[in-house]
Image (spheres, rainbow, N blue to C red):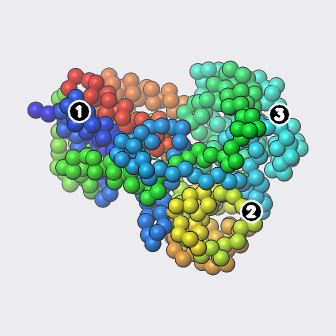
Amino acid sequence: MKKRVAIIGGGITGLAAAFEIEKANQRGETKLDYQVIEGSNRLGGKIQTHRRDGFVIEAGPDSYLKRKTSMTTLIEEVGLKDELTTNDTGQSFILKGTSLYPIPAGAVMGVPTEITPFIKTGLFSPLGKVRALGDFVIPKTMGPNEDISLGHFFRKRLGNEVVDHLIEPLLSGIYGGDMDKLSLKATFPHFQQMEETNRSLIKGIKKSRPKTPKKADVPTKKEGMFQTLKHGIESLVEAVADKLDPESIHLSQNVKNITKSGSGFTLQYEDGVKEVFDYVIVTTPPPVTAKLLSHYPYFDYFKQMEMTSIATVAMVFPEEAVVQAEEGTGFVVSRKSGYTITACTWTSKKWRHTTPAGKVILRCYVGRPGHSDIVRKSDEEIIQTVLNDLAHVIEIKEKPDFFYVSRWSNPQYQVGHTFKLDKMKEDIEAFLPGLQVAGAGLAGVGLPDCIDQGKACAKAIMDSKQ
Ligand code: FAD
């Protein structure tokens, strides 16, 4: 009899796991019966693309970091290589007060590495700039095996101004979290390593950056760091699903709980039906995972994990209705400026394939820790709030032709995240062997990180005695 693997959740993590097993089955290396069990009526989870009248509008993720290769590999494996496209680069800004300030040249994730643009920017006061340069002399903030919050780390190294007006809007956007609670070790461990090696973060980053090319080699245009698919990220979901055994995909099938039974596991669904599997890969968001396994004491961290509610707001306008004072690809918002929006991308400039000629797409984010009320409001109220905020920096003469508002929640990696995860994994290995837990709540929220995790779970099962 074939051993049975349940993959709970049909987001990118679950699909990557399923595809890995499917490939090994095809190669004749394994004979595993895998089943993807998805609670909603569609695959993709947070990946969702709206395609309409020539527009390609992402509700969730819109791209990925090119240097993280597992996403490109998956795209190539399912035959979508020709669909890949890189972002158009342009100036990004910080909205502070009612002005858009260009992000100073040389700032890496907000950490200044070029002195002249940093000294010249109007984003910080003279005192704030002097404080940031204190990084050159300030002692190390932590030992190699400690964890502190991103806020604690950067405030100590560079001071509050640079954190509040540059680093915070840039970094917490990626994790949708609170800088003063997010774990440094789990989110940006290389900053910790740089401090460990160089003490000064500025020196460490400068050292790690590629040397400036000789004049003749300087490219005319900076190459984008992100990639996406011309027909949307959801085309990857569709292509992976096409490679799987159609009988192995189950939609609208909500798992209610998972119990260890004998050498395997029993899944109980919402409709009461039970099914037995030899292995289980759980890729649901952490609070759901904790609920599915609530009768075991190993998932307390997941139970307590805070989730940040956010919404993305994509709006389509006729080109002539939007007048931008600044040329660029978007801005993030300084948290001290009293706005509800946290970021805005001029999608039609950054990703030209998304927008037919004569139209403009603006994509904004709302919602952050402690300010989630906005996400619960009606679409119309959210749109009005976003338009009111945008009016400070962009002249918008008409209501949008149409819009999409999408609500999400993101896991917050709290201080000590990696240590708590290690303990959880140890407990699972000892007391629930055959169970794998993966996904955005664990080892990275980026699409490539999720793919890596899904593949690793599949591999762990394939490598175990089947
Ligand atoms: P999910 O996609 O959340 O999948 C989990 C699945 O489990 C869902 O389909 C859900 O329906 C299902 N499920 C839940 N409960 C049950 C149950 N009881 N039974 C069965 N199934 C269940 N990353 C990037 O790399 N680049 C970006 O540009 C980017 N932008 C983002 C923008 C937004 C607005 C958001 C929210 C995230 C973004 N991310 C980005 C992060 C990335 O999209 C996610 O981390 C990733 O898609 C998560 O995949 P996952 O499979 O782990 O989880």
Q: Quadrant of the C terminus?
A: top left
Residue 324, position as x, y percentages in the image: 71, 67
| 333 is higher (above) or lower (below) than 465 | below
Residue situated in front as seen by the camera: 21 or 338:
21
Residue under label 1: 27
Residue situated in front as seen by the camera: 131 or 55:
55
Residue situated in front as seen by the camera: 184 or 194:
194
Q: Which residue type carries mark 3?
A: Leu
Toward the bottom, the furthest residue is: 398
453 relative to 251 in the view: left or right: right
Question: Which of the numbered marks, if any, corresponds to residue 326?
Answer: 2
Q: Nearer the viewer, mark 2 or mark 1?
A: 1
Q: Which residue type carries mark 2?
A: Glu
Task: State how far apart marks 2 and 1 are (Cα).
Answer: 54 Å
Q: Which residue type carries mark 1?
A: Arg
* Quadrant of residue 439 within the rendered picture: top left
Residue under label 3: 133
The local crowd at label 3, few if under 14, some if 14 to 19, many if 20 or more residues have their Cα within 10 Å, is: some
| 13 is higher (above) or lower (below) than 142 | below
- The reply to whether callout 1 and callout 3 are in contact (CB within 8 Å) is no
Q: Residue at x 29, y 41 (%)?
A: 18
Residue 307, position as x, y percentages in the image: 50, 48
